[in-house]
Amino acid sequence: MGQSEVAIRFSDVCFEYEKSGRVILDEASFALRKGMKVALMGQNGAGKTSLFNMIMGTVKPSSGNIFIDKGMAVACAQQVVPREQLDLKIRDFFALYFKGADYELDKNIKDVMEAVNLTLPMDKPLSAFSGGQQARLLMASALIQNPDILMLDEPTNNLDNDGIGHLMMFLMSYEKTCIVISHDADFLNTFTDGVLYLDIFNHKINQFVGDYYTVVEEIKAQVEKEVRKNAQFKKKIRDNKEKMNYFSNKGGKMRLIAKKMRDEIEEMEASKVDVRREDKTIRKFTIPVQADVVGDIITISSVTVMKNHQPEEKKLEIILKKRDHLVLKGPNGIGKTTLLEKLAKNNTEGAKILEGVKVGYYRQDFSTLDFGETVYNTLLNAMPKQEEEKMRSVASGFLLGNKIMQSRVGDLSEGQKGLVAFAQLVLQEPGLLILDEPTNHINFRHIPVIAQALKDYEGTMIVVSHDQEFLDQIGISDELDLAR
């Protein structure tokens, strides 16, 4: 493609983190035309967010060249609102990203809020809004920069069905260059022209053209072909080694034949295809239930919901016992996350948790984790009785190897934080599980394993999720729609 058509080009780009020595890219190359919409795929921790930071210019490559067409503005909607911005009110938040004159800010805020289909009171801090509302604000913060290259990092996380539908329609009609990180296959298939695959094993970027499902099938077929080809090479190499050993022991001219065969073996070894290994999947696991807990685990007589941004009390009669799985439903902003937080702390007047019941709480923003602590200490301290061997075994099942175990939680990708949170639940052995959007950030290969573990959990569970397929898999016994 001509240089004038190129929006982004990576040429032999290498990048690694100096402190940890962790390699992200090794002579990686790709090019995107102006107006392309592509999905960026890769295993949790492969470095997808790091790649976004390189395009933004906030991170510099170790070597190689990154070309962004001159004059093209780049903006990124992050996964979560930075903690230092949560206390800002909406106007101050957008002022951080708007490049125009101050007198133009209010009109532009109005325009981008309409674009993401969001209406919010301007006098409240961002921390007062739900995860779904914050997700739309993050999208709007990118749009207010009027970018030529728009990057979205897990944009469907925390969005309800209406929010996802609106985002799909927006991206289908969006005429500029767009790169999206997402684990939502159906969402990606509606608008993408291709896929960039960041390989965590060889640190290259493979580029594929076509809609998402077609590309996934193409990758699958290519891998199968490469595996078959390698199997043929492996058989020939094994056969030739046997013959080579036979001839080399004969001496004389036979050794020349053995040398020729050795050269052929080396050539076949070099010709073996470097197969793109599939993402590893977490091992099957169980969440042990707290022993000797019986009776009414949690009783809910009333909850507070938000209607038109005003609190409203809702009377209920809900009693949950062991093996009861309750799903909370309702649109973004109605108060699901706030309710779960109060239930987890057992400090709401309308609900009471049975005395002595241990609560395992999975928050969508992972704020129950200490970001300054190592993964090792986080998991060890989660155990009622600290047993390092057991803890390491559980961690290994969640792909948390020795290198990750010594990392600070705050340095992990969002997907890796999710796996730490699930490993923590296993080690806590709770009597009550409270889960707020537990599939957010999680690799789609892990989700069926997690769903089966939750289905088999013998304690009490309260969950919020917009992923209906996931809810169907975990065995919901009760439903509470806060909008009714």
Image (tube, rainbow, N blue to C red):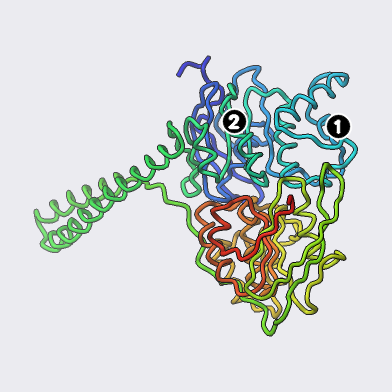
Name, please, the residue furthest toward the bottom.
Answer: 292
Position of residue 112 relative to residue 418, above or below, is: above
Quick one: 227 or 462, which is closer to the camera?
Answer: 462
301 sits to left or right of 294:
right
Q: Residue at x 43, y 34 (%)?
A: 208
Residue hosting label 1: 91
Q: Report x, y in % for residue 155.
A: 64, 40
Q: Pick the quarter of the image with the N terminus.
A: top left
Residue hosting label 2: 169
Q: Amino acid at mark 1?
A: Arg
What whole-number distance in Å separates the C-alpha atoms at marks 2 and 1? 26 Å
180 sits to left or right of 300:
left
Q: Report x, y in % for residue 264.
A: 21, 48
Q: Are marks 2 and 1 in contact (CB under 8 Å)?
A: no
Q: Is residue 372 visible?
A: no
Quick one: 313 or 90, which is closer to the camera?
Answer: 313
Tell me the mark number nearer the camera, choosing from 2 and 1: 2
The kind of secondary structure element at disc 2 is: helix
